[in-house]
Amino acid sequence: MSLDPEIRAVREPSEIIACHAVMSQLRPHRNHQDAFLQQVLRQFQQGYLLSAAWTGTKIVGAVGYRVQENLLHGRFVYVDDLVVDENSRGGRLGAKLLSVARDHALQSGCKHFVLDTGLHKALAQRFYFREGLLAHAMGFVECLDEATEGR
């Protein structure tokens, strides 16, 4: 990357839409801009925060996170989304975006910082280990839409 990206909070609908291109690299099933915008706006109402890394007018990375609380971790920040544009990787931008969410956890009095990644994402796992996160659990998911009926 030739310019050092500026990381700032995303709040406005136009900024959310600007995040779509990079976020769809992580979430390809969110391929419609308007549906993506509406989803993020709903998540904002649930405490979701979104920060993006801008190089000029282009977003080259994003992190989505929220404060949560449960019996396992107490109060913690959960990272929903972390993505760096495939053409901007390798310059520590992912670490900088992760630090935004981690700093929010510390400022919010959280004792834990939590995220999940797919078992098939070996490069992501290597990155998270390098950033000081340790594997703590294995997640399980059941899809509840009609496509799974009769399995």
Image: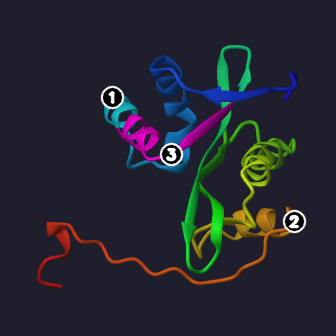
Q: Residues in magenta?
A: 39-52
How would you rate the neighbour count of disc 2 (Cα within 10 Å): few for under 14, some for 14-19, many for 20 or more?
few
Farthest-out residue, front: 109
Query: Element at badge 3?
Result: loop
Judged from the image, the secondary structure of the residue bearing numbered disc 2 is helix
Q: Nearer the viewer, residue 93 or 49?
A: 49
- Amino acid tagged 2: Arg
Residue picked out by circle 2: 130
Distance from the alpha carbon under mark 3 to that under mark 2: 28 Å
Q: Quadrant of residue 79?
A: bottom right
Q: Which residue is mark 3?
A: 47
Residue sitting at x 64%, y 46%: 83
Residue 34 marker: 1
Camera-nearest residue between 81 and 122: 81
Mark 1 Cα within 10 Å, few/some/many (few <14, many 20+)? some
Q: Farthest residue toward the top?
A: 57
Quadrant that contains the C terminus: bottom left
Which quadrant holds the N terminus? top right
Query: Does residue 6 show up magenta in the picture?
Result: no
Give the residue at x 79% y 53%.
Answer: 106
Determine contact: label 3, label 2, CB under 8 Å: no
Q: Where residue 107 sits: x, y (%)?
A: 78, 48
Badge 1 element: helix
